[in-house]
Image (spheres, grey):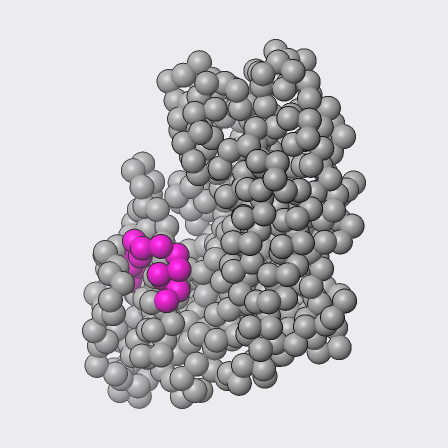
Amino acid sequence: MTFKRYMKAGAMLAVAALGLTACGGDTATTPSPEAPADTTTAPSPVDETTPAEETTPADEPAGEAVQIDYLHRLPDGEGMVPVSEIVQRWNDENPNIQVTATKFDGEAQEMITKLETDVNANNAPCLAQLGYAEVPDMFVKGLVEDVTEEARKYEGDFGGAFGQMAVGDTIVGLPQDSGPLVYLYNATEFENLGIEVPTDSASFIEAAKTAAAEGKYIASFTPDEATYWLSGQAAGAGATWYSAENDQWVVNTTGEETQAVAALWQELLDAEAVATHDRWGDAYGAAMVDGTLIGNIAAAWETGFALDGLDGTEYEGQWRVAQMPAINGSEMTGPNGGSGVAVMKGCEHPAEAMEFNAWFNTQVDDLAQQGLVPAATAPASTPEKMSRQFGGQDVMAELVTANERMSTDFGYIPGFPAVGGEMQTAAAAAANGSGKVADIFEAAQAASIAALEDAGLPVAQS
């Protein structure tokens, strides 16, 4: 059963079991904000904004521009093309559809909480950035619009991530960026050690043991990234964790494909052939700077900043990007992060919102400057900083290949973020030797069933 088919069944179950229809009812609308025609990137406080006076399409003077609000959490950092500048180009070229972009500066979960509150208050933006793992929850809660008909018009502009914005046959927006797992490595150090870039599990283990004998590590096992890092590897190995059968959810986080991932990392840990750092701890970056960590499986979006600490060091320009080594004989890779732009429930102008949505998310060079791996099929130019840090490699071309290789049969359940905490705890035990890697996936199995049952959803008993 494909991801789309089982998610359709699962979504229907979720809506029925939770007694939810559209959040606020089918008559809920979002007032048209009286926004200026030009776009600004304003601070976005967590507390609610004051809604503009509600109008209906009949009240609007002929020819009045449609106003669309877009809430995002793109970095807008130094050296990046500002979102406000990108959107201003749209506004200049589309006087009848004017967009106001607002950056949300809080945590991702805070933005989700705000969106839920705003939808219930009929005060939500038309468009909002959502992580792919957040989409099922938002759909089940009735917080997003069904824009399937509009989305299909733009399907050809996007790659495999298009399905990440679908729950069954219902599409709620368009993909913006993707996070296929890739392999980052120091090419100079590999050459010095006489090892090749690993292409499968066997060569990965062999290269890791060779490097470790010389005090170098071609990978690091990262417990704090276990949720999406390991589930993404399982997806690449061919696993499908969640499906639906006979009107019930089927959970299988411990199947043969996933066990191949567990076996790979357990052998590497037992041989002390890999480092064990939290990805977002100081030790990880320090190991790159001192030259002991010379590679790792990483999300594609890390290419935008992963090597910043090496600028000005002897290792600057030595690293490269390759495809993730095949696990379980599979040439696929899996997802680790990524987000799309959804149409929020109550948007009065979904067609116009989707027109902008499709345009914005195909501005691939601008999105690449934001540090994203665009989900659109159009190739993006490799940003100058990235090219310099990766020794002139056309990194974006390599990431397009990774996008094309990403599994389309792996999705998430409502409540999946809660599963991650249990996985990370088990991963920390595996890293320090008090547990096994297989325990991580056993924990995911139990936590997934608990999350679904807590939501009142029927789960098949194995």
Q: Is residue 291 magenta?
A: no
Q: Nearer the viewer, residue 43 or 31?
A: 43
Residue 314 location, x and y as percent? 44, 13
Could you tell me which residue is drawn at 60 percent across and 61 percent down? 447
Could you tell me which residue is drawn at 44 percent across and 21 percent down? 289
Residue 151 location, x and y as percent? 53, 67
Q: Nearer the viewer, residue 199 or 271?
A: 271
Q: Nearer the viewer, residue 133 or 364?
A: 133
Quadrant of the rendering where the N terminus is positioned: bottom right
For the magenta stretch, what is the residue range?
100-113
- Residue 442 visible (yes or no): yes
Could you tell me which residue is drawn at 66 percent across and 76 percent down? 458
Residue 440 location, x and y as percent? 63, 49
The answer to which image quadrant residue 57 occupies is bottom left
Residue 384 located left or right of residue 376? left
- Residue 156 visible (yes or no): no
Could you tell me which residue is drawn at 68 percent across and 18 percent down? 210
Residue 231 location, x and y as percent? 62, 50
Residue 208 higher or lower than 403, as above or below: above
Residue 154 higher or lower than 283, as above or below: below
Residue 287 located left or right of residue 44? right
Residue 439 higher or lower than 270, as above or below: below
